Amino acid sequence: MNFSLYIAKRYLFTKSKNKAINYITLVAGLGIILGTAALFIVLSGFDGLKAFSLEFTSFTDPDFKVLPSQSKNISLSSTQRKMLSEIEGIASFSTVVEEKVLLSCEGKYLAIDLKGVDKYYPKKTIDSILTYGDWISQDLQQIVAGWGVSNTLGFGVYDLTKIIRIYAPKPGTGQITSVKGAFKSMKVANVGLFQINESINSSRVYTSLQNAQYLLGLKPHKISAIEIISLPGVDETKIRLALSKIFDDEIVIKSRVQLNAALYKMLNAEHLAVYLIFTLILIIALFNIVGSIIMMILHKKDDLKTLYSIGTTKQEIQNIFFMQGVIMTIIGGLIGLFLGAVVVGLQLCFDLLMITPSLSYPVVLKGSNFAIAFSTILILGLIASRLASWNLKKLQFTDQAN
C-alpha cells in the first residue's frame, strides 16, 4: 500500500487527542456531505421544473414545422401532398393557417392568434389540450378558445346567448373607404376550451382550416405552415433534405427545439446559474477541508519531523495530507449523493413537497446529475486539498533534523 495513503488514512480515521481537531474534521465532512446532497437535489429539482415547463411543447408543437422562407404562405399542391406522405420517417402531417385577428363578444374585443387546422391535426394533441367541450368540426363555423380568452371576453361553451365574431383584415391594396370594407368577419360558436399555458391560453383560438382560409382570403392550396410528426429515431437530415427537394428550397424547416429556441435558451441559462450558485456554496464549504488539514499539519508537526528524519521526503509528507483531503472528499461526496438520491426518490414516490394541493414539486432522477455533482465536488476537493498541503512548504524539517 502506498505509504502516503496509509498514513493519511490513519490520520483521518484515528480519533485525535485534540478534540478541536476532531470537531473541525467532523464539520468539514458534514459540509461536503450536505453540500453535495444539496447540489444533487437542486439539479434534480431544476431538471424536474425544466421537464415540466417543456411538457406542453411535446404535445402542442410538431417534431418539424415547414414555414415559408420569404412570403407569408406556402402553396401545397396535391402532387406535393402525395410526395410528403411518401417521405420515409414521417408518421403524419397537417396543414395550418395562422394569423393575428380580432375576436369580439358583446362589445368586447381581443387581438388573438387564430390557428386554422385541418382534419389531420394530431388527435394526441387535441386530447392533451382540450379540457372542456368538443373539438371543432371542419365544415362548421366553430372555434375552440383558450381559457384566458374565454374569461376575458366572457363567453362559455355552446353559449348561444353570446354573439362571437372573428374579424380579419381583407388582403389587397388601395384606399380603405369604410371599416366594413377593411375587414372580413365570421360569426362563430365556441364549442370547447383548451388549456396549454397561461400565455397561449390567453391569446390563441383554434378553428377549421377552411374557416381561416375564408377569413384571410386564401385559396384552398394556400397555407401558413405544415406541421409534421415523425417516427421515433428518424434521421432528421434525411427529412430536411426530402422536404427541401419537394419545395425547391423555398421553405424554412424548424425542429421543436428551434420553435422554442428562446424558452430552451432561458432554461439552459437558469440551469447554469443555479449550478454556479451552488458550486460557490460548495467552494465555501470546502474551506473547512483546508482548515482541517492545516490544523492537522500543526497538530502532527512533531510526528512529521520524525517521519522526515527517518527518510520520508517532503513530497511524500505533502502527499499524506493531500490524500487525506481526497479521501474525505470522496467519502463525503458519495454519502452526499446517496442522501440526495434518497430525498429525490422519496419526493418521486410520496410527493412530500407540493406546489399546489394537486401538483407535487417535479423532480427527475438522472445519471448525469450524479456525474455532475460528484465531479464538481471531486475537482473542488482536489484543489482544496492541494492548497492545504502546500502549507508544509513553510515548515523547515532540515534544521530540526540536523
Image (cartoon, rainbow, N blue to C red):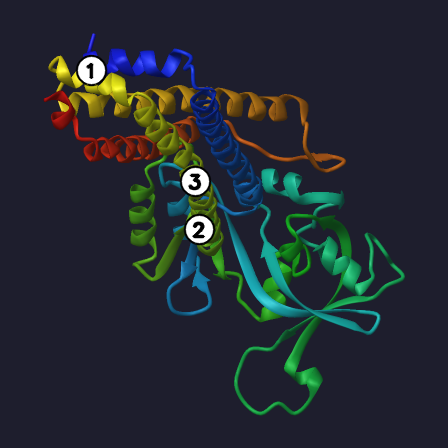
Q: Mark on residue 284?
A: 3
> Residue 353 occupies which quadrant of the picture?
top right
Q: CA distance from mark 1 to mark 3?
A: 34 Å
Name the spot of residue 27 as percent of width and height, x first: 48, 27
Name the spot of residue 174 as percent of width and height, x first: 54, 90
Q: Are marks 1 and 3 in contact (CB under 8 Å)?
A: no
Instruction: Name the N-terminal-most of marks 1 and 2.
Output: 2
Q: Secondary structure at mark 1?
A: helix
**Image: 357 above or below 98:** above
Name the spot of residue 92 as percent of width and height, x first: 48, 40
**Mark 1 or 2: the one toward you:** 1
**Mark 1 or 3: the one toward you:** 1
Mark 3 is on which residue type? Ile
Residue labelled with disc 2: 269
Q: Which residue appears farthest toward the right when viewing the image? A: 161
The residue sitting at 46% across, 68% down in the picture is 72
| Quadrant of the snapshot with the C terminus | top left
Q: Nearer the viewer, residue 98 or 344?
A: 344
Q: Is residue 325 visible?
A: no
Q: Is residue 312 visible?
A: yes
The residue sitting at 71% across, 83% down in the picture is 180
Residue labelled with disc 1: 306
> Residue 106 occupies which quadrant of the picture?
bottom right
Q: CA distance from mark 1 to mark 2?
A: 54 Å
The residue sitting at 64% across, 35% down in the picture is 361
Mark 1 is on which residue type? Thr
Q: Secondary structure at mark 2?
A: helix
Q: Is residue 241 left or right of residue 120?
A: left
Label 3 crowd (10 A; few <14 / some 14-19 / many >=20): few
